[in-house]
Image (tube, helix red, strand yellow):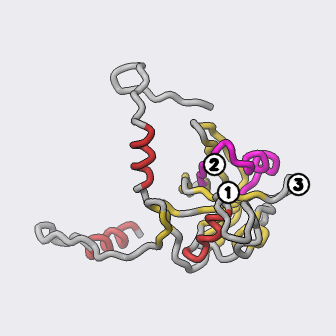
Amino acid sequence: MATQTTNATGGTPAAAAPRDEFIAAMGRVATGVTVVSTGGEAGRFAQTVSAMCSVSADPRLVLVCINLRSPINEAIRAHGVFAVNVLGKQHDHVADTFAGRPWPGKERWDFSCGEWVEAPSGSPRIRDAVASFDCTVHEVVEAGTHLIYIGRVTDVESHESEPLIYSAQAYAKPEPIEPSVFPDYPGSGPTHRQQKKEDSQ
């Protein structure tokens, strides 16, 4: 399914931003690191992705984007299920392996990295993932070089761990910062956030 962007004044397609500038700017974006996996009669497959987000809580939906060239696409189509494994800081070797950059002694897409268990759908699940969402395929949309998978979440696991982050071509972990406080706006900062949280409960 293809889409076309138009500007606000008419039906003329909007000019595309230069590719190199787009890639450089996206490289500055900090993202979580996830491994999408599937298992079944077609075998076990997994792929590292950075484009993952929540879509809806009712119904429970998540979204991932996978390059059209990845061999996992055919397997997901055959199985109709996939799992989204959110990696912790201890999983950098897992991220590299399923991004096609295995460490010495490992093969690409080698499940001997990390500790895997089977999710209810049959998809491989990283035992100590920060979070793991077992899904059935809800919708698939083709956009540019990628397939966008929207999965209906059927099972969830989570564990206390620091998530793995990727930015500027390097792995990192979250670091807490002191909240901003503005003297001209009394109640801003931690007090404001706590009050908002209490008001929403």
Q: Earlier in the sequence, mark 3 or mark 2?
A: 3
Relative side of 66 to 79, left or right: left
Label placed on residue 47 = 1
**Crowding near the residue tagged with mark 1, few <14, some 14–19, many ≥20 C-alpha atoms within 10 Å:** many
Q: Earlier in the sequence, mark 1 or mark 2?
A: 1
Q: Quadrant of residue 188?
A: bottom left
**Crowding near the residue tagged with mark 3, few <14, some 14–19, many ≥20 C-alpha atoms within 10 Å:** few
Task: Check residue 75 for magenta coloring.
Answer: yes
Q: Which residue is mark 3?
A: 41
Label placed on residue 66 = 2
The quarter of the picture where the C terminus appears is bottom left
Task: Check residue 101 for magenta coloring.
Answer: no
| Disc 3 residue type (three-letter) | Glu
SS of the residue under disc 2: strand
Q: Nearer the viewer, residue 14 or 136?
A: 14
Q: Position of residue 178 (x, y in %)?
A: 29, 76
Residue at image x 45%, y 38%? 19
Relative side of 79 to 49, left or right: right
**Crowding near the residue tagged with mark 2, few <14, some 14–19, many ≥20 C-alpha atoms within 10 Å:** many
Q: Is residue 180 above or below residue 4?
A: below
SS of the residue under disc 3: loop
| Disc 1 residue type (three-letter) | Gln
Looking at the image, which residue sits at the far right? 41
Residue range (magenta): 62-82
Distance of label 1 from label 2 (alpha carbons)? 8 Å
Q: Position of residue 196 (x, y in %)?
A: 32, 68
Distance of label 3 from label 2 (alpha carbons)? 21 Å
